[in-house]
Image (tube, coloured by chain):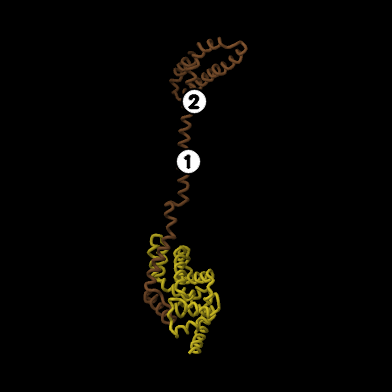
Amino acid sequence: MNQEVELIKDLKNPKLKNKAFKDLLDLYQERLYWHIRKIVITHDNTSDVLQNTFIKIFKGIDKFKEKSTLHTWMYRIAYNESLRFLEQNKIKNSVSIDENNNSYIKNLTQDSFFNGNEIQLRLNKAISELTNKQKRVFQMKYFDDLSFKDISDILNISENTLKSSYYSAVKIIEKKILEQC
Amino acid sequence: MKNSNQQNKDISKLHKEKLGMDIPNDFFAKSKQTILNKVIQEEQPRQTIFWLRPMIAYPIAASIVLAIALTLWMQNKDIDTTEQITNTETIKTISPDMLDGDFLTSSLLISESEMDTYLNSYLITNVVIEAELSQQELENIFINSILIEDSLINTYLNKSLIENIVL
């Protein structure tokens, strides 16, 4: 947390902003990439959204009121940018926009940077069958390693609801994978 | 917070192993550079168009234009005044000649029917102007007297009146 506090201070200082922004990229670029990738699916689209996200972070850091932690604020920007991208491009493969699971898997397998085996594809199929809320909570908790408190701040949903959704999601995924075996 | 590099590696490994999602080699280094370039590009226009903020730059530019305009106007005004002085001096030097000889000589060549018109035009062009010049000289004496010290005022007035009015 101390590292974040120092980083925010430097980011808000015009003389240190550029240097601090480079440190911010080193710290969070990879994590935000994977967070966005699970929403927009393909690598190329993820790269575009990631760039837009960091430009917004750079421009908006002066207005950051520190009501939440820096990383949850950045995850929220990344999440909103991803949804905005899907909305603008009317991509039908994301479950957040379209509930069509086949479309999700089709886009995933068509991406040149997807090289998953049979087991990995099964997990993706199981995730694609979750509801939007279950999917986001499961992805953020399991893959992004975020706490329920952080997820609650990002999605603006109560922690109890999130916990319930997460455990439901885990059970559904286990069941789906077993069914596919 | 865990060591951030290790945490990043763990997250990337998890996504690759569990979801089969991959990324191009050296992607994050290239992406970082692209983002930094874009951020610099976004910032540049504000600095390169004008190094001062519009709030400061525009009043300065307006002041410079106003100063140039005033200088030009003042120069033109000086030229006009000089021209006027030159004209009055020219009239002043010509008019005594007209009084001495020209009027009498030229009046001999004018027929009686045109004499009234000739006299009118002569009066307007010479007598009226002469009167105006005298009045102007009087005004000059009074204006100059403002600049003369009290002790010298009587001498100045006497001298000026004798030179300009009596003579």
* Mark closest to the chain's N terminus, 1 or 2: 1
Residue at mark 1:
B66
Residue A115 in picture, x, y percent from top left: 42, 80
Question: Which hue is chain B drawn in?
Answer: brown
Q: How many marks?
A: 2
Query: Which label belongs to residue B84?
Result: 2
How far is mark 1 from mark 2, CA to CA?
Answer: 27 Å
- B93 up-or-down from A139: above or below: above
Marks 1 & 2 on one chain? yes
Residue B108 in picture, x, y percent from top left: 55, 9
Would you call the spot at circle 2 few (<14 residues within 10 Å), some (14-19), or many (20 or more)? few
Q: Chain of mark 1?
A: B
Direction right: furthest residue: B113
Q: Residue at x 56, y 11 (%)?
A: B109
Q: Amino acid at mark 2?
A: Gln
Residue A150 in picture, x, y percent from top left: 47, 75
SS at mark 2 in the image: helix
Query: Which label belongs to residue B17?
Result: none
Among the chains pictured, the one given yellow colouring is A
**Residue A160 in view of the camera:** no
Q: Residue at x 44, y 56 (%)?
A: B45
Q: Quadrant of the N terminus of chain B?
A: bottom left
Q: Nearer the viewer, residue A142 or B34?
A: B34
Residue A117 in picture, x, y percent from top left: 43, 83
